[in-house]
Image (cartoon, grey):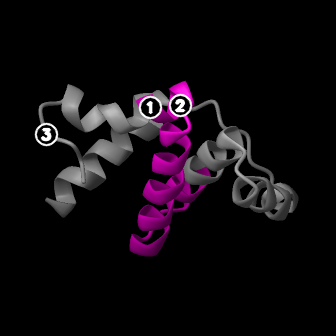
């Protein structure tokens, strides 16, 4: 299942190439995400996915899920990929 999750996340990265994340803006993005800004949550999650690594992937999933729960459409689309591909809920 880990391989499937990584494949889905890789496909998501290809589909969602609109995140601009500068290194010096990382702290501001994190602060905004912690304050509940759904776009910042999504941007932070996508940035973490691009960085890779098991811990980053877990954190990315968490941030994107929180954003989706706040009804941010791009995050909802990312969360829907596993179902779209017939892989279940991705949880």
Above or below 52: residue 6: above
Mark closer to the observer (2, 1): 2
Quadrant location of the C terminus in the rendered image: bottom left
> Which quadrant of the figure has residue 88?
top left
Q: Earlier in the sequence, mark 2 or mark 1?
A: 2
Mark closer to the observer (3, 1): 1
Q: Earlier in the sequence, mark 3 or mark 2?
A: 2
Q: Are marks 3 and 2 in contact (CB under 8 Å)?
A: no
Residue 40 location (% of width, % of height):
71, 46
Q: Are marks 2 and 1 in contact (CB under 8 Å)?
A: yes
Where does label 2 land, which residue? 71
Question: How many numbered discs, if any?
Answer: 3
Where does label 1 land, which residue? 76
The magenta stretch spans residue 74: yes
Q: Residue at x 45, y 48 (%)?
A: 65
Q: Mark 3: which secondary structure?
A: loop
Q: Earlier in the sequence, mark 3 or mark 1?
A: 1
Relative depth, front residue between 79 and 8: 79
Above or below 65: residue 73: above
Q: Are marks 3 and 1 in contact (CB under 8 Å)?
A: no
Residue 27 location (% of width, % of height):
82, 65
Q: Residues within 10 Å of mark 2 (few under 14, many from 20)?
A: few
- 45 with respect to 8 (left or right): right
Mark closer to the observer (3, 2): 2
Magenta span:
47-76
Residue 43 location (% of width, % of height):
65, 44
Q: Residue at x 19, y 58 (%)?
A: 3
Say the numbered circle drawn on residue 87: 3
> Which quadrant of the figure has residue 24?
bottom right
- 38 with respect to 31 (left or right): left
- 60 with respect to 26 (left or right): left
Cα distance between the residues tagged 3 and 2: 22 Å
């Amino acid at each position: 299942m880990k391989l499937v999750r990584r494949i889905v996340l890789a496909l998501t990265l290809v589909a969602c190439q609109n995140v601009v994340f500068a290194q010096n803006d990382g702290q501001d993005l994190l602060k905004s995400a912690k304050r509940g800004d759904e776009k910042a949550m999504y941007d932070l999650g996508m940035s973490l996915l691009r960085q890779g690594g098991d811990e980053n992937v877990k954190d990315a999933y968490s941030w994107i899920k929180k954003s989706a729960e706040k009804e941010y459409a791009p995050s909802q689309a990312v969360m829907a990929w596993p179902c779209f591909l017939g892989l279940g809920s991705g949880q």
